[in-house]
Image: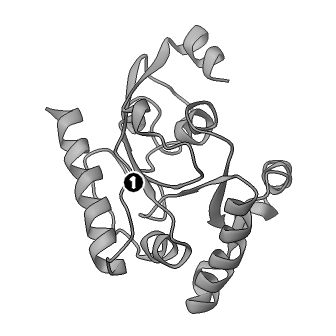
Amino acid sequence: MLSWLKITCNLNFKVSGVKNIPKHPSLILSKHQSAWETLAFQKIFPPQVWVLKRELLLVPFFGWGLAMTSPIAIDRKAGKKALDQMLVQGIDRIKKGFWIVIFPEGTRIKPGEVGKYHIGGAWFAIKSETDIVPVAHNAGLYWPKNSFIKKPGVIKVSIGKPISSKGKTSEQLNGDVRNWIENEMIKFNA
């Protein structure tokens, strides 16, 4: 798919910080702007599963295919129960060697905007004793949310150094991740 985007849309990408990817399964907390990152992360990172809203699995064909990737599907309205589901399933996936991808803002956010960073990813990292790899990118500039049209260019992806969860509260860890990602986003616009 990424090669096809390059050929048909002249849309490519450049990744900085590849050396920051640990050898052991970790938690990726990333900006979510586009459908592009759902494709590109499969190439950039080791095998992974995603935390996603359960309703996506009900979409004909797309959802059925998505279900085959062993996602961590949660009911976002279930509160604490959803976190417990995420923890049990997430620890299982990490033990099986998978990385976990979470979009802490919960949905795609337009370039230049900042959504609320939900605490679930940081909470999971602390409870599972998993490092967080923060990721920033500007894919939304080239493949906007809900847009069929793709713009030519080079998507920039920045992978940060792993952030340890040891000795931090969920709020502190979430703040560290948010600050790193949003500071990187400012660099993309500079």
In the depicted structure, whether residue 20 falls above or below residue 49: above
- Percent x, y for residue 138? 36, 36
Residue that mark 1 sits on: 109
Q: Decide if residue 55 is on the left or right side of residue 31.
A: right
Is residue 133 in view from this perspective? yes
Count of labels in the image: 1
Badge 1 density bin: few <14, some 14–19, many ≥20, Cα 10 Å:
some
Secondary structure of the residue carrying numbered label 1 = loop
Is residue 54 in view from this perspective? no
Name the one closer to the observer, 44 or 65: 44
Q: Quadrant of residue 7?
A: top right
Q: Tell me the quadrant of the picture where the N terminus can be found.
A: top right
Name the one closer to the observer, 64 or 16: 16
Residue drawn at (41%, 32%) of the image: 19
- Percent x, y for residue 76? 59, 79
Q: Quadrant of residue 81?
A: bottom right
In the depicted structure, whether residue 69 falls above or below residue 6: below
Residue that lies at the very extreme toward the left in this rendered image? 190
